[in-house]
Amino acid sequence: MSIKIFYTASFYGKAQYQKEYDMVRESILKTGVDMISPELGGYTQVLSKRERDRLRDKNSIHYASIKRGIMMCDATVIEVSREDFQLGHEATLAIQAKKHVLCLSVNEDYSKRIKNPYFHGARYNRYNIDDVIGRFISKVDREGFSERFNFFLSPSQLTYISKQARLEGRTTADYLRGLIENDMG
């Protein structure tokens, strides 16, 4: 399997939820995907030595590594049982990059509150975690952008699409995908 997953969890929740963090990590690894995660260590290697030296302080290196890891991966899994502002920011970074995000909690299913085609949530336990992770990985695998489609536009059509995309802060390709997704329902 060539899917790459970024996995993270709240540093501040480690004392209370480390057992759950480990359960999620192991479930992801069982699927055979490649994983980048602070929970595995070595995640700062996504930055070059030069970048790490330039950033110097531990917090800057950590944040830059998380951001780069999210962008390098096909999807992100976040354990959110301990609510954390930084985790919300990281989920938003991934969603803005059109990456599927799975937020897992032993307390609540956040997909009941947050509606976005790239956001997925689930309340999990030791009995259903493998199924929840497996379904998410399958969805990411099915919906990855693997098909290229080229077509011709008139100059006025291209100008219009480019203008609309800019107004929404999107690329033209992302704008067109959004039109198709909206039409699909």
Image (spheres, helix red, strand yellow):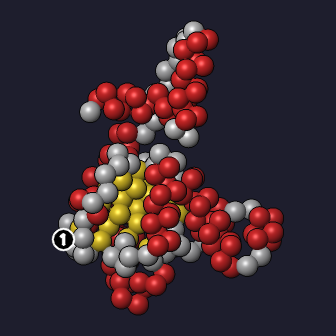
Instruction: Locate residue 11 relative to residue 142 in the image: left or right.
Output: right
Residue 184 vs 142, above or below: the answer is: above
> Residue 30 location in percent, x, y?
35, 63
| Relative depth, front residue between 114 and 43 | 114
- Residue 56: % across, % down: 77, 76
**Residue 4 shows in this picture:** no
- Tell me where residue 44 appears, x and y as whole percent: 64, 69
Which residue is rendered at x = 61% and y = 11% of the image? 155
Could you tell me which residue is drawn at 74 percent across and 62 percent down?
A: 48
Please give left or right for residue 83 compared with residue 5 in the image.
Answer: left
Label 1 Cα neighbours within 10 Å, binned few <14 / some 14-19 / many ≥20: few
SS at circle 1 = loop
Which corner quadrant of the image does residue 184 belong to? top left
71 up-or-down from 26: above or below: above
Where is residue 143 shown, x and y percent of the image? 37, 39
Residue displayed at 50% across by 71% down: 86
Residue at 37% from the left image edge and 72% from the top image edge? 80
Q: Please determine whether, in this image, residue 140 is positioned above or below residue 157.
A: below
* Apparent side of residue 64 relative to residue 57 in the rendered image (left or right): left
Residue under label 1, please give it.
127
- Residue at the far bottom in the pictured view: 15
Type of amino acid under label 1 = Tyr
